[in-house]
Image (cartoon, helix red, strand yellow):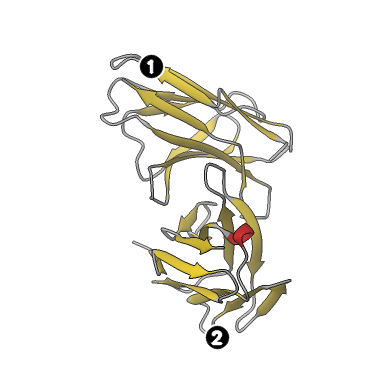
Amino acid sequence: DGGITQSPKYLFRKEGQNVTLSCEQNLNHDAMYWYRQDPGQGLRLIYYSQIVNDFQKGDIAEGYSVSREKKESFPLTVTSAQKNPTAFYLCATSNLGYTEAFFGQGTRLTVV
Amino acid sequence: GQQVMQIPQYQHVQEGEDFTTYCNSSTTLSNIQWYKQRPGGHPVFLIQLVKSGEVKKQKRLTFQFGEAKKNSSLHITATQTTDVGTYFCAGPGGGNNRKLIWGLGTSLAVNP
């Protein structure tokens, strides 16, 4: 969606390196989410944040870290502790009082 | 924990045939949402159903929410090649968090 920007679209990293994926939104939505999607798979929740300076682990948080210092931004760091980091990463937002999610274009991370 | 199951996982149809995907939750849902993800794209919100027994239509797409609010279906009449993609259902995780619990999706392929 136009109001959610994920960058870059494609990212290549060497094994053992940490990498940070960017997610910026101008929708003024309070909640932000990070999902991981593997080929032919559904969406698995990594982390989510409902307000600034607060976030909760999702179902697969190990090897990932996040921060929420500003309402507009929710960067995701894929650390070297993540065993299989190659995947499609999707950032999403939702507005106060609603649960429907709006997604960014995604970042395809390849670790070699 | 709460689960949302979706069937079938894959469906291959000839253009013009109908298509249905089914979603079943292990718990009662306050609402059910449907999303479409085109190949290589990101999920896009289609619709939300809230009321027991609710039926909504969007052109050739018909969405239903079961009487017990635990199941839902999406029916596409006379499929077109533009319908190709993966259709996901999702429901709120409950409680004070605003997580969505996602089905694994149904991938639809349409032969022209």
Residue B92's mark? none
Badge 2 amino acid = Glu
Instruction: Give left or right: position of A61 versus B67.
Output: left
Q: Mark 2 to mark 1: distance in Å?
A: 49 Å
Number of labels in the image equals 2
- Report the residue at 56% width, 77% height from top: B18
Verify CB contact (< 8 Å) between mark 2 and mark 1: no
Residue A13's mark? 1
> Alpha-carbon neighbours of circle 1 within 10 Å: few (<14), some, or many (≥20)?
some
The subunit letter for the residue under badge 2 reads B
Image coordinates for residue A73, horizontal then vertical, percent: 62, 27
Tag in front: 2 or 1: 1
**Quadrant in which the C terminus of chain B is drawn:** bottom right
Image coordinates for residue A71, horizontal then vertical, percent: 66, 30
Q: Which residue is mark 2?
A: B67
**Quadrant in which the N terminus of chain B is drawn:** bottom left
Residue B71 visible? The answer is yes
Quadrant of the rendered image containing residue A87: top left
